[in-house]
Amino acid sequence: MPSDTPVGTEKKFIVRLVGLKPGASRETLVQALQRLLKGKSAEEIGKALERLPLVLSRSVSEDKARQLKLFLESQGAILKITYSASAVMVPPKEKRGQEIAPARERPKEAERPPDRVDRRAKPRIHAGIQVQPMGVGEILDRSFRLLRQYFWLFFVIIFIPQAVFFVVNFGLQFLISGDVTQDFSSSMGAGFGVSAFLAVLIFLVLQFWAQGALIHAVSETYLGHSTSIKGSYGAMRSRLGRLIGTMILWSILVFGVPALFGIIAAVAVPSLAVMGLGGLLTGIIAVVAVILAIWIFTTLFLNWLVADKVVVLEESGWMKALRRSKELMKGRTEPGFWKSIKMKASLIILVGFLIGIGIHLLFQLPGVVLGIVFPEGLVVTTVQGVLNMVAVSLATAYTAIAMILFYYDIRVRKEGFDLKMMAEKL
Amino acid sequence: METAKDRLTIQTPEQVGFDYALAGLGSRTAAFLVDTVIRWFLVLAILAVVGLVYKFLPALDLSAWVKDLSKTWLIALAVLAYGLVDLGYFLLFEALWSGQTPGKRRQRLRVIRMNGQPIGWLESSIRNILRAVDLVGGFYPVGIVVVFLSRNNQRIGDYAAGTVVIVERQRSVPEDRKEVHAPQALTHPEIEWYVARLKPAQYQVLRSFLERRGQMEQGHRHELARLLSHQLSKQMFRSTRVSISYESFIEEIVALYEKRRRAI
């Protein structure tokens, strides 16, 4: 029986660790690898696991490769085993015909790479990670799971701007009035105005930076990669200007347009009344104007809801990001009124809002009790401020994670984002 | 890397394991939201019925009796009535509907015992009476923290009753599943060649594309079909000039593959 294996040469294999199975324990795998990779510390192996693929061996026998596969897969690893090219000798000429025949004539269409490389399909999904269409419940639950699993990563990212603002605000109040328990309004002055403006400016820049860093961190962890607080903030450096610009444009349009409409209505409605229009009719027009202003705000808000994700993850900005967001939020991907994209987004925001209220209650009640029991002072104000920051950070993080997963869900449904990733590995 | 840890595995004495996906805070809040809306309507309906009875049945005039009651008693009665609707709604539905309320049913959630058995009146009563502790101050501040810290996403009521909320598996087959039919005659003879070499993982990707293409935007749908066909021919080292559309090409491969699998 002919064989491709040259006489006297054993087939050799390369064993690579390419990922972890969902649910696999990282610690267990590190311990298992420590038994195999003698002389490597747990820390070194842990770091290597963050930079997968990890080559475990470049030249092992078939039996050894099988043993490795059985053992490591039982510990939650995903392995890729390939022939070691250097170890396989070129078979004799007469045997070459038995190899897989290469393409005789490649069709022109097949040869040609896709017309346009989809830049938006860039984030790569880690092996073993399931990215698939999800319902609202699944999005909310997965957000909860992500928040719990990467609690400190997400929490600290959001907490940093809050903490900086708190410290700056605290310091300014102390410098200006000499008493942190006094409000700014009680010690007005030119110095205060400039300082307050600077504090708000610093806060806004940091807030947008944190927003971008959180999007980056959630995206990385959701797609199966690892990241850190420093890494997430660092990844946003090149995109920060674009993100701030787009979000300022977003704010002007989302809040400015309805406000403008409201001002026009506020001027027009009394004028109509003066011109002799009946009270009832004027009232109806006023109500319609209010409803219209709310409708304009809601429509613009929902249309451009994922603009920040587009800026960070697709690297586009300004009007292009707003257009892309509108394109993603348009239409429906499933039948049913409650399953339209905008309705799903509203439900996620509503649930996030309710959970946010619960979190605020939990963290602010002790502050209120503290304020009642003890006289107002530095300690009470500080504790109340810190509790408030924790509440804001937690509530913001949960809803933000849910919205990022929602953005991916739209792309999975409308663009087959996951299928594109899989097709490339087909 | 995110891991799917939110699972509960119940081992039977016969060493058969049942794996359940645990419901998280989000889907439970969404279910609670639906139940809250229904309870509001229920309270409104009760008020409307009381109003109608009061108006149309003068014989049942309770005004004299109400006047005799002190203000404290009236408040107590109102709280009791609301409590009965509030508590009774969850208690009755969960006990009678095997751990489901309308909101939970909509979200495909179910309360079960920790050993996998359906809950009864006792479990339903305990977990719903203790809802008041989770709810203290409104909006479940205690419940949120306890669920967040719990390994099985349990709130205090769940701990006391020995229950857990799970997500039910979707039993329905995707609608598009029936759409792909084996063609009467193959439009291209090389399709058989492809099908013979198609791996299960490749088939799954093609099948997913056919099931979900209806949701996709036209441009992306066409691009994906082309990418899949391109990758398939590249992987199989095959020179195939497809005279039909990419989607039809994929459809024929999937249909023939399924036909052969059925035959086996």
Image (cartoon, rainbow, N blue to C red):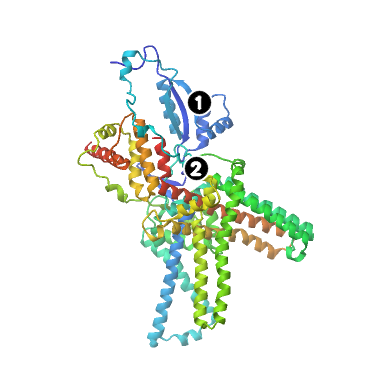
Instruction: Label 1: state its secondary structure.
Output: helix
Q: Whole-Å distance between the Cαs marked 1 and 2? A: 25 Å
Chain under disc 2 = B
Direction from residue A223 to residue B60 in the image, left or right: left
Name the foreground residue: A327 vs A414.
A327
> Residue A378 location in percent, x, y?
74, 58
Residue A213 in sight here: yes
> Residue A407 location in percent, x, y?
48, 50
Return the residue found at the far top. A8
Q: What residue lies at 75% left-to-right and 55% top-to-bottom?
A: A171
Quadrant of the image occupied by residue B102: bottom left
Q: Residues within 10 Å of mark 2 (few under 14, many from 20)?
A: many
Q: In the picture shown, does residue A262 fall above or below A176?
A: below
Which residue is the site of mark 2? B2
**Disc assigned to residue A78:** none
Amino acid type of the residue that numbered disc 1 sits on in the rendered structure? Leu
Which residue is the site of mark 1? A36
Quadrant of the image occupied by residue A418: top left
Q: What residue lies at 53% left-to-right and 59% top-to-bottom?
A: A353
Amino acid type of the residue that numbered disc 2 sits on in the rendered structure? Glu
> Residue A4 location in percent, x, y?
34, 17
Name the foreground residue: A240 vs A224.
A240
